[in-house]
Amino acid sequence: MRNSRSVSNETLQLVVDADDAGQRLDRYLAATLEHLSRSRIQSLMDEGRVLVDGAACKPSHRVEPGEAVTIEIPPPPPARVAPEPIPLEILYQDADVAVINKPAGMIVHPGAGEDAGTLVAALLDRFGAEGLSTVGGPLRPGIVHRLDKGTSGAIVIARNDAAHRKLVEEFRDREVRKTYLALLHGKIKSEAGKIELPVARDLRRRSRMTARRREGRPARTDWRVRQRIDRFTLIEADLHTGRTHQIRVHFSALGCPVVGDTLYGAPRQERAGSEVLPELGRNFLHAVRLAFAQPITGRPIEVRAPLPAELAEYCRVLARATNADAASIDAALREFL
């Protein structure tokens, strides 16, 4: 795709290439401006902030080579997150960092139309604005990295700006060790392996990522089998990169989606033997271990997040439904409880 693109504080200008001719205007913008959501692009069009050769057009307008598309993006209004008295399980805490056991169903910071019940709101209630870093801006105080809404487990929080900047360096230099436990739908032939597939935004379904675009960002996941339960596989995975939805995308690409992850191909309710299992209601993906250097002193810190009770129980239900050895299941889970 060849686009002439110049960026100012509030305006983007695009020139339609011959390769893009015939696309609907809204789809052309969604494919070209990956940092803007479809809903954001739609609202900008509704507000008359998208012009083609100086005139407003409908989303269905078919773009033609050489057309100049101008997108005016108004600065966002000042925004801050209100503290909410949401209980937090703090796994580790000192003057510079805290490690939280985030529950599934909680988003980390406001976005995509969700602005209540966030981890940030809970952190502000627990530590106050003065007890969290400001590097990420008013919507993300203390936030250095993310966990998906449907993923539970350990997440590190920066409590001051010096700690935040140092943690960013550790993540960038891949010095932070992140280990996850996941139950996969399907059998993996090997006992351990490495997945190196690029991860990029899926241009057809913007809520998804994909490993099928060569221009994606490099991503690596190392994994090993912890237990096999009929046609399901419990694995431990180490992330060497932190791409959006990385574990979910990588194992879906292998044909073994994470149990409960309907976005990436898992059924809403799993069948085991002759039984249909109760709906899990979340992804079976848990950030079980986080290891990093204390950002000020350099002291090694390793924190473990206990496996949520609903995930351990799901494994036991699965074992009963498939007549698997319950003792071996318990043994495999013991170190994570």
Image (tube, rainbow, N blue to C red):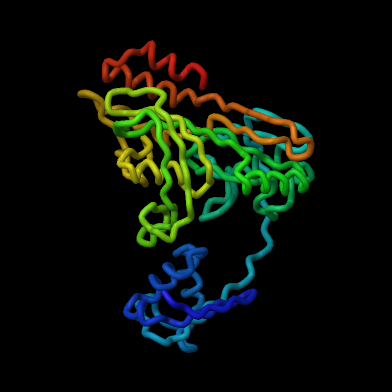
Which residue is rendered at x = 79% and y = 35% of the image? 297
Residue 139 in picture, x, y percent from top left: 65, 53
Would you say residue 87 is visible in this rendering? no
* Quadrant of residue 98 within the rendered picture: top right
Question: If the image is split into quadrants, where does the N terminus sit?
Answer: bottom left
User: Taking 327 as reference, is 70 left or right?
Assistant: right
Q: Residue furthest top?
A: 327
**In the foreground, 130 or 187:** 187
Would you say residue 250 is visible in this rendering? yes
**In the foreground, 123 or 178:** 178
**In the foreground, 108 or 253:** 253
Residue 337 drawn above or below residue 125? above
Residue 227 drawn above or below residue 331? below
Which residue is rendered at x = 40% and y = 35% of the image? 193
Residue 280 in picture, x, y percent from top left: 38, 32
Residue 191 in picture, x, y percent from top left: 37, 28
